[in-house]
């Protein structure tokens, strides 16, 4: 009995010493849990599968707790600037491409992910892939998927009018001329993509790029006027349907257009609409000028993942980024919802499990086949102030409230 009492006394004494002098002993047998905040935008569908994926990630990494922060695109974009400038942003973030130069022009706002290569499998990406997320020699972000603007057609409408999918500008205007007899236009289009379509024509026609590599305007006032003249031709000759009102899916439903010009990652919206009308939705070709020295077409990340520059738990955040980008399990949850994944491992998982939609696979092949001719999109090319200035002045010229010279001057003023 005395031995038992003595043993109990020693055990209690030892426990007290541990609590007083070795606090870590009080957590004996438990692991320290690191908390990582993760923010993204999207639809309810995206939120649901992402939350399911985060539960899976936490099960695989019990020492990491992920706090999800998600919203619609409009709210996310509106609040992002204040969050990152105040230092209140999440540890892991989904970001838009142009935010790299807007919020991290020197590469310091986001963590240099090349320093976390022990935790992120960068070998799943080519050097060209990673170049899109590099700022000032620092890997600030990694692309989730790529986007390029392409036409989508209801081939049934083209066939009924004896038309083929156009590949040149002359063919495009010829298609518009035939469709106009049935009071149809070729595309519904957003102002952003109207800018890209006009940009492709200009660069092919004038053999020069609109912007230099440092993001500065590379053309004259007179050449800007030529772009606006081309935009007016697109409207007058019914290539584009009511562009001042933006992209209009109901125009597809009501057969006012034979297709749409849009991001290939969003083409499934038109695919569903056309197929519901017993049509035959197909992806079109890059429109080109034969013999042109410039292609005029551009590729950009649809969105990217980045880590906060002063993240307190960079290794844990990197493990989360690796899961989101390279995990086969998460790829099968996400499928094509964010477009065709850039990660070779994620792409392989979708192909192996037959999760790639035919149109998205076709888009991927078009991008790969034309990769040598597709340019690296500069963030300034889709900056809101550029698109807004373009649309405001282009439509003012089309409507007659500004002359070509006044519209060109207005565009230049909007870029300052």
Image (tube, rainbow, N blue to C red):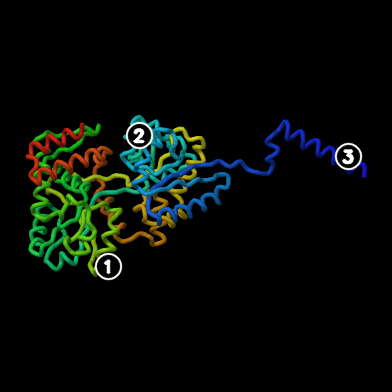
State the CA–CA distance, disc 2 to disc 3: 66 Å
Closer-to-camera residue (251/341): 251
State the CA–CA distance, disc 1 to disc 2: 42 Å
Asked whether residue 364 is in view, the answer is: no
Judged from this view, the residue extending furthest toward the bottom is 278
Alpha-carbon neighbours of circle 2 within 10 Å: few (<14), some, or many (≥20)? some
To which residue does mark 2 refer? 103
Q: Do the numbered discs 3 and 1 sit on residues whose CB atoms are within 8 Å? A: no
Q: Quadrant of residue 174?
A: bottom left
Q: Do the numbered discs 1 and 2 sit on residues whose CB atoms are within 8 Å? A: no
To which residue does mark 1 refer? 276
Q: As drawn, is 345 to the left or to the right of 261? A: right
Quadrant containing the N terminus is top right
Identified at 42% across, 33% down, the residue is: 86
To which residue does mark 3 refer? 6
Q: Position of residue 272 (x, y in %)?
A: 29, 63
Q: As drawn, is 85 to the left or to the right of 364? A: right
Quadrant containing the C terminus is top left
**Label 2 element class:** helix
Identified at 33% across, 38% down, the residue is: 99
Judged from this view, the residue extending furthest toward the front is 401
Alpha-carbon neighbours of circle 1 within 10 Å: few (<14), some, or many (≥20)? few
Q: Position of residue 155 (x, y in %)?
A: 19, 64
Closer-to-camera residue (26/282): 26
């Amino acid at each position: 009995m005395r031995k038992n009492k003595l043993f109990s006394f020693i055990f209690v004494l030892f426990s007290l010493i541990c609590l007083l002098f070795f606090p870590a002993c009080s957590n004996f047998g438990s692991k320290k849990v690191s908390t990582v905040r993760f923010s993204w935008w999207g639809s309810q569908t995206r939120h649901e599968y992402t939350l399911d994926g985060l539960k899976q990630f936490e099960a695989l990494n019990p020492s990491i707790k992920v706090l999800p922060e998600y919203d619609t695109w409009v709210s996310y974009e509106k609040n992002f600037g204040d969050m990152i400038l105040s230092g209140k942003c999440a540890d892991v973030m989904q970001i838009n491409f142009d935010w790299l130069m807007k919020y991290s022009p020197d590469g310091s706002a986001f963590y240099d992910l090349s320093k976390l290569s022990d935790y992120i499998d960068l070998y799943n990406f080519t050097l060209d892939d990673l170049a899109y997320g590099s700022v000032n020699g620092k890997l600030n972000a990694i692309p989730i998927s790529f986007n390029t603007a392409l036409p989508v057609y209801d081939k049934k409408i083209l066939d009924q009018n004896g038309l083929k999918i156009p590949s040149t500008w002359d063919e495009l205007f010829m298609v518009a001329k035939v469709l106009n007899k049935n009071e149809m236009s070729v595309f519904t289009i957003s102002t952003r993509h109207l800018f890209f379509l006009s940009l492709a024509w200009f660069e092919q026609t004038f053999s020069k790029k609109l912007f230099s590599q440092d993001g500065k305007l590379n053309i004259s006032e007179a050449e800007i006027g030529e772009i606006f003249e081309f935009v007016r031709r697109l409207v007058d000759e019914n290539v584009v349907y009511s562009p001042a009102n933006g992209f209009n899916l109901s125009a597809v439903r009501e057969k006012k257009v034979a297709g749409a010009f849009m991001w290939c990652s969003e083409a499934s919206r038109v695919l569903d609409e056309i197929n519901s009308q017993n049509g035959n939705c197909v992806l079109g070709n890059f429109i080109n000028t034969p013999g042109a020295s410039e292609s005029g077409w551009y590729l950009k990340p649809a969105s990217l993942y980045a880590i906060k520059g002063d993240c307190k738990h960079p290794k844990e955040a990197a493990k989360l980024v690796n899961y989101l980008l390279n995990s086969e399990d998460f790829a099968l949850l996400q499928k094509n919802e964010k477009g065709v994944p850039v990660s070779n491992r994620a792409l392989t998982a979708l192909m192996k499990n037959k999760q790639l939609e035919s149109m998205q696979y076709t888009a991927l092949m078009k991008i790969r086949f034309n990769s040598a001719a597709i340019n690296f999109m500069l963030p300034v090319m889709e900056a809101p102030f550029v698109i807004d200035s373009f649309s405001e002045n282009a439509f003012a010229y089309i409507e007659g409230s500004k002359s070509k010279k006044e519209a060109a001057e207005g565009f230049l003023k909007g870029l300052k």
